[in-house]
Image (cartoon, rainbow, N blue to C red):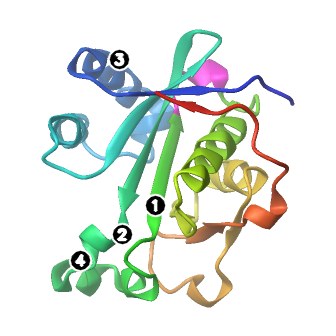
Amino acid sequence: MAHDAFTFVPMRPEHLPLMRHWLEQPHWREWWGDVDEEIAYVTDMIAGRDSTEPYLIIHDEAPIGYVQVWYLGDYQTGEWIATNPWLAEFPPETVGVDLSIGDAGNLSRGLGSAALRDFTLGLVKRGHGNIIIDPDPENERAIRAYARAGFRVIPHLEGKTPGVLLMRFELSDQAPASKVAMS
């Protein structure tokens, strides 16, 4: 399904009630952590205490979801690698992305794949050449959406870390970038 370009607006404190509403939805509860903890993480991102960049996904002038980019180099410490050994497999300039569609009524409409593709192409334009995503291997809907967006399973890492399926963005699978706006 074709979609017009998306806009990605940096999260601000006034967006936190919407984020909380989404986090309380059943399709978020299944894959995200405790609502209050997640809100605290996003609050830290907004305040600059965490290098992860959180964005609202805007489509047809309305927020439809959440996407973030995080920097692997910030997590390549002994403590993190001990529980997530796959972190050592990537150069420190690698970035990871996470995405969730806000309301369940927007699921299975191609919005997540299209938004992720546009967001990721925006990251490529910013100079990021190694982009990954790490869904739970049981989250089949997300894996299908990420594959449609151009992410491919990294075969030598498949099954190495419980609860994580590592996928890398393959730019060669993509058409030229559409209009992408990252405000």
Return the disc, 1 or 4, that comes first in the chain's sequence. Answer: 4
Return the disc, 2 or 4, that comes first in the chain's sequence. Answer: 2
Q: Which residue is mark 2?
A: 72
Q: Are marks 2 and 1 in contact (CB under 8 Å)?
A: yes
Q: Which residue is mark 4?
A: 80
Q: Which residue is mark 1?
A: 96
Return the disc, 2 or 3, that comes first in the chain's sequence. Answer: 3
Q: Residue placed farthest to the top in the image?
A: 61
Residue 90 image position (x, y, % from top left): 46, 82
In this view, 23 is above or below 105: below
Give the Cα distance between marks 4 and 3. Answer: 30 Å
Give the Cα distance between marks 2 and 4. Answer: 10 Å
Give the Cα distance between marks 2 and 3. Answer: 27 Å
Give the Cα distance between marks 1 and 4. Answer: 15 Å
Return the disc, 4 or 3, that comes first in the chain's sequence. Answer: 3
Q: Report the mark closest to the observer, 2 or 4.
A: 2
Q: Is residue 110 left or right of residue 30?
A: right
Q: Secondary structure at mark 2?
A: helix
Q: Amino acid at mark 1?
A: Gly
Q: Are marks 2 and 3 in contact (CB under 8 Å)?
A: no
Residue 50 lies in the magenta-colored region: no
Q: Which residues are magenta?
A: 101-106
Q: Residue at x 58, y 24 (%)?
A: 104
Q: Are marks 1 and 3 in contact (CB under 8 Å)?
A: no
In this view, 145 is above or below 115: below
Query: Is residue 120 at all visible to an observer of this figure?
Result: yes
